[in-house]
Amino acid sequence: QAISYAVNYDGIINDLWRGTATQMRGPIPVGLVGHDENLFQYQQDLEKARELLADAGYPGGGFTLKIMHAPVIPEWRPMALVIQEGLAEIGIKLEIESYAWATLRDKLNTGDFDMSHGYWTPDYADADMFTWFWFYSQNWGLAGNRSWYKNVVMDKLVTQSRIEVDPDKRLALFQGIQWIAVGDAVYLYLLQTDYQIVMRDWVKGYVFNPMLLNMPNFPGMYIEK
């Protein structure tokens, strides 16, 4: 939680991403059923971060962490610099490490890291694509739970959400999952990108699919000029 309060989200989104991203409000992104607009959202609050560190037995910070990234996403390194700056304000030294994509993934899969950048694109249009993979304790590593997180209550909730057929009850389960996830703060919920694509005005038939960002619907597209 202290680290979550130390991050300058506004700087990342408005300065680095030039306003082309939206700060995440928990694990379920805007656009999916289950997203909770009333969910608590971290904002930079350095005094709160220092207070939480002191409560945890680390007054003034005084320790070092490492964050890894890969060149596959150019924005990751400058984002790491912003995070580094925020953590320095609360007494945590953050070292930035760059790895080849394959090496980074190997480290994610074995838990050989302190912090890491990452991204996630859903394969199907359901909040389960985030909650089950990110939080279920048997999905550690590349399966999805890359914080190597375990919470028996969370395990029960995400399991129940997979079999519940009543929409209202399922929505309530997702709300509970999100509140626990934000409270336990095992991820920094930085941003979801506002997808942009450039095409000529004579290209017709394009249909945006958030689950196939780099796979346009070519069979349905045509040229009209």
Image (cartoon, rainbow, N blue to C red):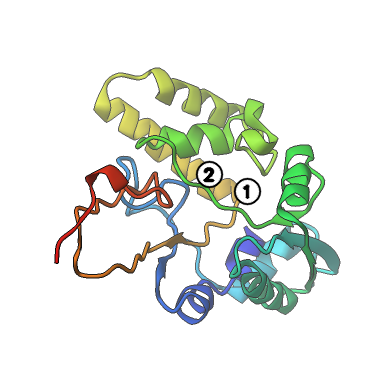
Q: Residue at x 60, y 51 (%)?
A: 187
Whole-percent x and y of residue 206? 24, 54
Give the quarter of the image for residue 6.
Answer: bottom right
Whole-percent x and y of residue 32? 32, 44
Q: Is residue 98 left or right of residue 12?
A: right
Q: Is residue 190 left or right of residue 111?
A: left
How many marks on residues? Answer: 2
Give the quarter of the image for residue 4.
Answer: bottom right
Label 2 residue SS: helix
Say what amino acid the circle numbered 2 marks.
Ala
- From the viewer's side, name the closer residue of 31 and 26: 31
* Relative to 220, residue 116 above or below: below
- From the viewer's side, name the closer residue of 55 and 204: 204
Q: Is residue 156 left or right of residue 50?
A: left
Decide: few, some or many residues near mark 1? Use Cα within 10 Å; few <14, some 14-19, many ≥20: some
Quadrant assignment for the N terminus: bottom right
What is the spatial separation of the Cα atoms under label 1 and label 2, in whole angstroms? 7 Å
* Relative to 133, residue 3 above or below: below
Task: Please give the residue where the numbered disc 2 appears in the rendered image.
Answer: 181
Q: Residue at x 38, y 39 (%)?
A: 175
* Relative to 30, residue 63 above or below: below
Task: Please give the residue where the numbered disc 1 appears in the rendered image.
Answer: 186
Marks 1 and 2 in Cβ contact (< 8 Å): yes
